[in-house]
Amino acid sequence: MDQRVAGRYAQALFNAAEKAGAIGQVENDLGEVLASIEGHPALHAFLMSPVSDRRKKSELLAQLFGASVSPLVLQALRLMVDKRREAEIRPMYAKYQELRREHDNVLHVKVSSKAHVPDDVRTRLTEKLGAQTGKRIEAEYELDPHMIGGIRVAYDNYVLDGTVRGRLARLRDKLKSELRSA
Amino acid sequence: MSNAKQSSGPPAIVGIVVGAALMFGGFWFSKNVKLEFIKTLEAQGIPLDPGKTISIIGVLLILFPVIKFFFIAPLAEAIQNRTTELERTFGEAENLRAEMTQMKQDYERRLVQTEADAREQIQSQIKEAQSLRQQMMAEASAKAEELKASAAREIETQKQQAIAELRHHVVELALQATEKLVEANVDDERNRKLVADFLETVEAPR
C-alpha cells in the first residue's frame, strides 16, 4: 500500500466534503461502506482481487451503496476502483479521519483497559485530557485481556501508562538504574 | 784505504829506476872492484860478494812493482771487492735483520694492540649483553606486571559484572513474583482504584 496515494485521495475527498459541508457524513458513509465490505469476506475478496473486472466492481458498488451513501463517497470509491486502488480504501479512510480530526481540533486517543471503563470515568478522562491538551477528545476504548489492571491511553506518539504492568516496568527500570549507578 | 796508501807511496817508476841502477851498479861492482876484506873473507871460507848482493837488491826493487802490478794489486782489488761485497751483504743482512726486528716489533705491537682491542671489544660486548639482558628483564618484568594488573582489572570487572547481573536477576525475579502476586489480587475494586489514581495523576503532553 502506498500511503502517499491514500493521502492524496483522502485530501481530495476531504476538500470536496468540506465544500459540500458534509465532512462528518462522508466519514460516516466511508465507515459504513468499509464495515460492510470487511464484514463480507466474499465481497471483500471480489473487490480486492486484481483479476475481477473493474467495471463490474464499480457497478456492484453503485448497486450496493448507491442508495445508502452520499454521491461523493460513491464517486470516490468508484474512482479508486477504476484506478485499481482498491487496497488504498482503508488507508484513505484512516487518512480522512486524521484530516477531519485536524480540521475539527480533535485528538483521537486509544484507551486500553482490562475491564469495561465506566461512563463516569470516561467522562472524567476525556474532560481532563481535553483540558490538558486543549483539544476535543475522541476516545476509542478497547479491552486488553493480557492486562493485570489499570488503564493505558495512547495518542500520537505518546503513551500514558497507568497499568500495573507499566508501573512494575517503571519500578524495574528504576531499580536497574540504581543498580547500575551503585 | 789501500788505494790511499798506494797513492801516498813513492811512484813505481822510481823503484824500477833505482833497482836498475843497483842491478847494473852491483854487476859492475862485482866484476870490477875487489875489496881487501872480501879477499880476506874468501880466504877464510866466507864467499861474500857485495856487488851481487846490491845487484840482487836492484832486481828485487824492479820485481817488487811488477809483482805488485800484476799480482798484489788485482789480489788486493779482489780482496777489496770481496770485502766490499761482504760488507754490503752484511749491511743488507743487518738491514734485513733490523727490518725484521722492526717488523717483529711492529707485529708484536700490533698483536698486543689486537689483543687489547679484542679484549676491549669482548668487554664491550659483555657489557652490551649485560645491559640488554637487564633491559629485557626489566621489560619482561614490566610486561608481567602489566599483565597481572590487566588480569586483576579483568577479574574485578567480571566480578562486578557478575554481581550486577545477579542483582538484575534478583530484581527481575522479585518483580515477576510481584506481578504474579498482584495479578492474583487485583479485583474490580482495586482496578477502579488504579484507574482513579491514574486519572488523578495523569498529565498529557500537548
Image (cartoon, coloured by chain):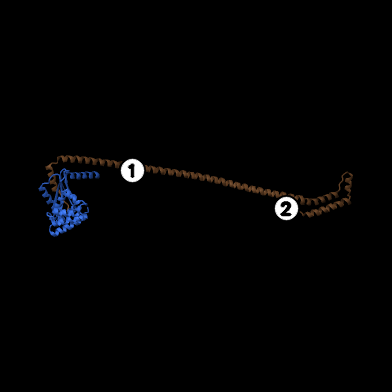
Chain colours: A blue, B brown
Q: Nearer the viewer, mark 2 or mark 1?
A: 1
- Marks 2 and 1 belong to one chain: yes
Q: Nearer the viewer, residue B180 or A175?
A: B180
Name the residue at the bottom extreme: A19
| Label 1: chain letter | B
Task: Rate crowding at label 1 as few (under 14), some (14 to 19) or many (20 or more) other CA atoms within 10 Å.
Answer: few
Q: Is residue A118 left or right of residue A175?
A: left
- The residue sitting at 84% across, 52% down in the picture is B23
Could you say where residue A176 lies in the image, as x and y percent from the top left?
A: 23, 44
Question: What amino acid does circle 2 point to?
Answer: Asn
Q: Is residue B147 left or right of residue A6?
A: right
Could you say where residue A11 lies in the image, as x and y percent from the top left?
A: 18, 57
Task: Rate crowding at label 2 as few (under 14), some (14 to 19) or many (20 or more) other CA atoms within 10 Å.
Answer: few
Q: Nearer the viewer, residue B191 or B5?
A: B191
Could you say where residue B200 lies in the image, as x and y percent from the top left?
A: 13, 48
Could you say where residue B184 lies in the image, as x and y percent from the top left?
A: 15, 39
Q: Is residue B109 left or right of residue A152?
A: right
Q: Is residue A13 visible?
A: yes
The first of marks 2 and 1 along the sequence is 2
Kindly state the secondary structure of the residue where label 1 is placed. Answer: helix
State whether residue A113 is above or below residue B13.
above
Which numbered dot is residue B150? 1
Q: Which residue is mark 2?
A: B3
In whole angstroms, how far apart are the C-alphas of marks 2 and 1? 106 Å
Question: What amino acid does circle 1 point to?
Answer: Ser
| Label 2: chain letter | B
- Picture quarter with the C terminus of chain A: top left
Name the residue at the left extreme: A120
- The residue sitting at 19% across, 50% down in the picture is A46
Q: Nearer the viewer, residue B161 or B11?
A: B161
Q: Nearer the viewer, residue B54 or A135?
A: A135
Kindly state the secondary structure of the residue where label 2 is placed. Answer: helix
